[in-house]
Amino acid sequence: MSRVETIAEGVTLYLGDCREILPTLNGFDVIVTDPPYGIGWKRGVNNARSSKAHAGIQNDQDTSARDFALEQSPVPAIAFGSFYAPFPKATKQVLVWHKPPDSGLVGSVTGFRRDAEPIFLVGDWPVRTVESSSVLRTLRGQAGITTETGHPHTKPVDLMKTLVGLAPGQTILDPFMGSGTTGVAAVKLGRRFIGIEIDPAYFDIACQRIQAAHDAPDMFVEPIAPAKQEAFEL
Ligand SMILES: C[S@@+](CC[C@H](N)C(=O)[O-])C[C@H]1O[C@@H](n2cnc3c(N)ncnc32)[C@H](O)[C@@H]1O
């Protein structure tokens, strides 16, 4: 691990490989994460859409990094993924993120948009009465948000707020935090947050975004509750 940033009490960010850092952590209740999907994603130049080439993200050649993180931690998890890669072993239910109507044009040759992504509920999920649809819709997709954050897979904050809001537990862990959207959502909802990111450039973006969210919280949100006991152990 090369850096630890404490944004506020209960909000700690680690720069490094989650496969090394996770075994040293405890005190989190639930994982909410958008890991490498295991599809070897990369992007060529697309002049029509003014998008730049991207060489891909680390550990996306298969699902082993995701599987390590989910299997190492005995807590329930919400994890994004792909319909075109193996699902996590302990998947209990699959939600669908239905992206906005202008999404999913690139890469499809079948006439159908690629505008749906699976979100896996994994592990020991608490028993609850039915209240929410398993299809989550957003007004914004990823394209515009990516330009704002500089990360090609930044998720909409509203989507992450919905998922963090549904996540059982006070302390959220994201072992693949990228530009930090899960952390932004957690802080805005007054939850405690632990984030890990391997890429130093994305880590810096996450630190800035989560700090900004902390400094300008949404109205009517309870501040982060003090810990009952020390949550982190290095
Ligand atoms: C799909 S992106 C997450 C994007 C994020 N949801 C956002 O809104 O910005 C997955 C991230 O996992 C990071 N990553 C890949 N392998 C990792 C590892 N072993 N430990 C920590 N982070 C890792 C990548 O650098 C990438 O930023």
Image: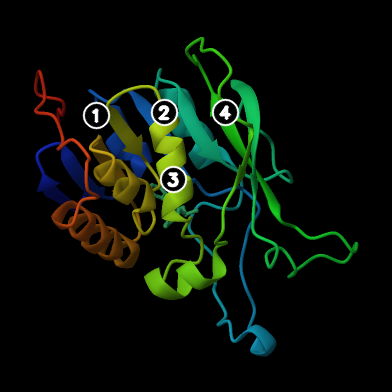
Instruction: Give the percent coordinates (x, y) of residue 72.
Output: 42, 24
- The verdict on label 3 being within 8 Å of ligand 1 is yes
Instruction: Give the percent coordinates (x, y) of residue 149.
Output: 38, 69
Of callouts 3 and 1, which one flags the residue occurring earlier in the amino acid sequence?
A: 1
- The verdict on label 4 being within 8 Å of ligand 1 is no
- Could you tell me if the residues under marks 4 and 1 are in contact, i.e. CB atoms within 8 Å? no
For marks 2 and 1, give the CA distance: 19 Å
Q: Secondary structure at mark 4?
A: loop
Could you tell me which residue is drawn at 58 percent across and 17 percent down? 130
Instruction: Give the percent coordinates (x, y) of residue 112.
Output: 85, 59
Mark 4 Cα within 10 Å, few/some/many (few <14, many 20+)?
few
- Quadrant location of the C terminus? top left
Could you tell me which residue is drawn at 14 percent across and 56 percent down? 215
Residue under circle 2? 167
Residue under circle 4? 132
Q: Residue furthest right?
A: 110
Of callouts 2 and 1, which one flags the residue occurring earlier in the amino acid sequence?
A: 1
> On screen, 49 above or below 54?
below
